[in-house]
Image (cartoon, grey):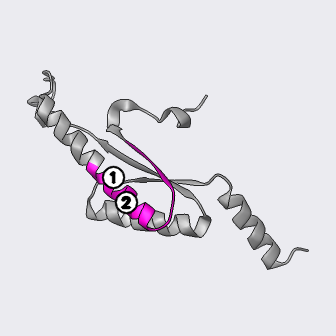
């Protein structure tokens, strides 16, 4: 019979091997809380973080449902800038906590990350 210490050590080793915690960041209060949790969890597990920020242009920006004109470049760029700023600020916090992280920012319609696609 294994001792509690042995099973805890095995569990910790299993969890920390190539562990990545994915967290969405958007600069909101809830996004900040999610990042706080992810930082704490990454420290516990010895995991890396993958910071994701995505944007979606609401239908009203197109003039309403069923109408999709060319999206105004400045509006699209504004959404992109906010997402980039959110993920950059999150990355600074993660690095200040002494952790490693990768970042992804892009429109929500891009689909799954190429490394995460099921084959």
Q: Quadrant of the C terminus?
A: top right
On residue 49, the disc is none
Residue found at the far right of this picture: 1
What kind of element bears circle 2?
helix
Residue lying at 34% horizontally and 51% vertically, measured from the top left = 87
Residue found at the far left of this picture: 63
Q: Is residue 27 left or right of residue 94?
A: left
Q: CA distance from mark 1 to mark 2?
A: 6 Å
Q: Is residue 21 left or right of residue 13?
A: left
Q: Position of residue 85 (x, y in %)?
A: 27, 50
- Confirm whether residue 45 shows in the render: yes
Residue lying at 70% horizontally and 66% vertically, measured from the top left = 12
Q: Position of residue 61 (x, y in %)?
A: 12, 34
The front one of 94 and 116 is 94
Residue lying at 37% horizontally and 60% vertically, measured from the top left = 92
Mark 2 is surrounded, within 10 Å at the Cα level, by few (under 14), some (14 to 19) or many (20 or more) other residues, namely few
Q: Are marks 1 and 2 in contact (CB under 8 Å)?
A: yes
Q: Is residue 71 magenta?
A: no
Q: Is residue 93 magenta?
A: yes
Q: Is residue 75 above or below residue 12?
A: above
Q: Give the magenta part as a residue range.
A: 85-104
Q: Is residue 23 left or right of residue 64?
A: right
Q: Which residue is mark 2?
A: 92
Q: Which residue is mark 1?
A: 88
Residue lying at 29% horizontally and 53% vertically, measured from the top left = 86
Q: Position of residue 95 (x, y in %)?
A: 44, 61
What kind of element bears circle 1?
helix
Residue 11, quarter of the rendered image: bottom right
Q: Is residue 87 above or below residue 28?
A: above
What is the number of callouts on the image?
Answer: 2
């Amino acid at each position: 019979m294994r001792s509690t210490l042995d099973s805890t050590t095995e569990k910790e080793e299993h969890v920390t091997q190539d562990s990545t915690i994915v967290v969405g960041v958007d600069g909101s209060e809830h996004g900040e809380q999610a990042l706080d949790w992810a930082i704490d969890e990454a420290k516990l597990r010895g995991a890396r973080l993958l910071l994701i920020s995505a944007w979606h242009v609401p239908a009203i920006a197109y003039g309403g449902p069923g109408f999709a004109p060319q999206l105004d470049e400045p509006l699209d760029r504004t959404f992109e800038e906010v997402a980039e700023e959110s993920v950059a600020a999150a990355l600074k916090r993660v690095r200040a906590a002494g952790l490693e992280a990768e970042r992804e920012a892009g429109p929500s319609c891009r689909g799954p990350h190429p490394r995460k696609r099921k084959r």
